[in-house]
Amino acid sequence: MNTIWLCSWYPNSEDEFTGDFIQRQALAVSAFASIDVLHVVFCKRYENVISQINHNLTEHFYYRPKGHHLANFAAYVQAHYSFYKAYCKKKGKPALIHVQVPFKAGIAALCLKFLYKIPYIVTEHYGIYNSLLDDAYASRSWWFRFFTRQVIVNADRLTTVSYSLGEDMNALVTKKSYTVISNVVDTSLFKYSTPPPESHFYFIHVSNMIPLKNTRGIIEAAAELTKMRSDFSVVLVGNVNEEYLELARQKHLLDTVIFFKGILPYEQIAEQIAAAHALIIFSDTESQSCVVLEALCSGRPAIVTNTGGVKELIHEENGFKVNVRDSAELVMKMDAMMTNYRNFDKQKIADVAASQYSYEAVGRQFFELYLKVNS
C-alpha cells in the first residue's frame, strides 16, 4: 500500500529532535506499507533533500526561505502540491494520506482531498487542548482554530495517542470518533535489564525541562526526601536550566543528590534508564509521554502525575500516580517506590509494555486502520 505522510513535525537538519516520535511511528508502519514522508521547513535556504531510510520509507525535506506569513503559507501549499504531482508521476495515486499533527500539514491534505479525492487520516500528538498552557488551543488565533477544525472534521479517521487527548479535542474542537494508537518504542534499545543493586536508589527524569514539566517540583521533593533518607539520587536528563542548577545548588543537592546529564542521544537515554530504578514525570499535563513508555518497556516502574494521557499508562502493577504540583505527595510516593520496589515485577512490566508499544504492535494497528479506510 503506497501512502504519503504529511508531517507538521519531523526531525530535520534544522531541528533533530522535533517530532522524533513521529519518525519512529513511520519506521513502525513502514514494515507494513510504503511511506513517503514530506516535511517542509522554513529556514534560510532553498533546498530539496531526499533520504532513503529503508525499502519502504523515504523522507523528503523541502527547505524554504522564511518570509512574510502569507508568503510562507503560499510556499507551504505550493511545496505540497509540487511534491504530490511528482509523487503521482513516479508511483501513481496514493492509497491515502496520513497527517501527523493537523496544523499545518493537514491544510495541504484537505486541499488534496478536495482536488483529487485522496482520503486522509489525522494523528494528533499536540497537548494544547486544555487550559493549562499559555498557548492553549482556545487562546490561538481564529485561523489556527478554524483550519484545525476543518482538517479534523474532514478527516476520514482521527487517531490520538491517548483517550484523554481525544476527549479534550471532542470538547474543544469538534465531536469526532477517534482511535487511540500509542506512540512507539524502539524495543531493541528500551528492553528489560536487571536493575542496579537497591543499596542506592536512582530515580530518573527525562524531559526538555520547560516549566510545564515541573522539574522544580522534583528538585524540591528530593530536598524534602533527604530529611527522611539519604540512600537515593535523582538523575535529570534534558536541557540544563540555570534556574534549576541554582535551586539544586542552594539546597546543597547538586552533584550529591541531583545530577544533571544534559541533552543525550536516544541510545544514551536508554542506557540512563537501564542504570536507574524508576522514572519520575511530574508534569502539569501530558498528551501521553514517550519516556514513560520507554521506561516501562525497560522494566522500570514510574511515578507520574494523575493528568492527561500519562495517567492512562500507570496502575498499581507498574507505578504510582500523584496529584499535579503536589510535592508532598511526590515525596511520599518516592519513599514508597523505594520501600516497595521489590514488589514490582519488572520483567512483567517490560513484557506487557513491549506487547503494546513495540514497532510491530503500533505499526500493525496503523496498517489495519489503513485497510479500513480503503475498504
Image (cartoon, rainbow, N blue to C red):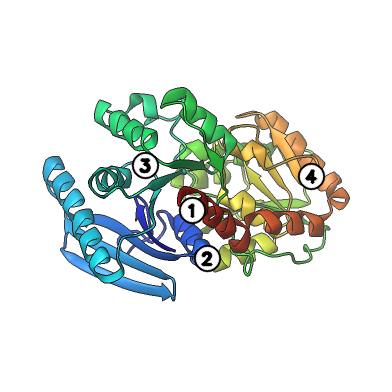
* Residue beneath disc 1: 370
Q: Quadrant of the N terminus?
A: bottom left
Kind of element beneath mark 4? helix
Q: Taking 110 as reference, is 336 left or right?
A: right
Which x, y percent locates residue 264? 50, 63
Q: Amino acid at mark 4?
A: Met
Alpha carbon distance from label 2 to label 3: 23 Å
In three-dimensional space, the C-alpha distance between marks 1 and 3, rounded to whole angstroms, equals 18 Å
Residue marked by disc 3 = 102
Q: Residue at 42%, 44% (x, y): give it.
A: 122
Mark yes or no: residue 10 visible: yes
Density class for disc 1 (Cα within 10 Å; few <14, some 14-19, many ≥20) is many
Q: Tell me: residue 364, above or below residue 112.
A: below
Disc 4 or 1, which lies upstream in sequence?
4
Number of the front mark, 4 or 1: 1
Q: Residue under circle 4? A: 337
The amino acid pointed to by label 3 is: Pro
Q: Which mark is residue 32?
A: 2
Name the residue type under label 1. Answer: Tyr
Question: Is 75 placed left or right of 292 in the picture?
Answer: left
Q: Nearer the viewer, mark 2 or mark 4?
A: 2
Mark 3: secondary structure: loop
Disc nearer the start of the sequence (2/4): 2
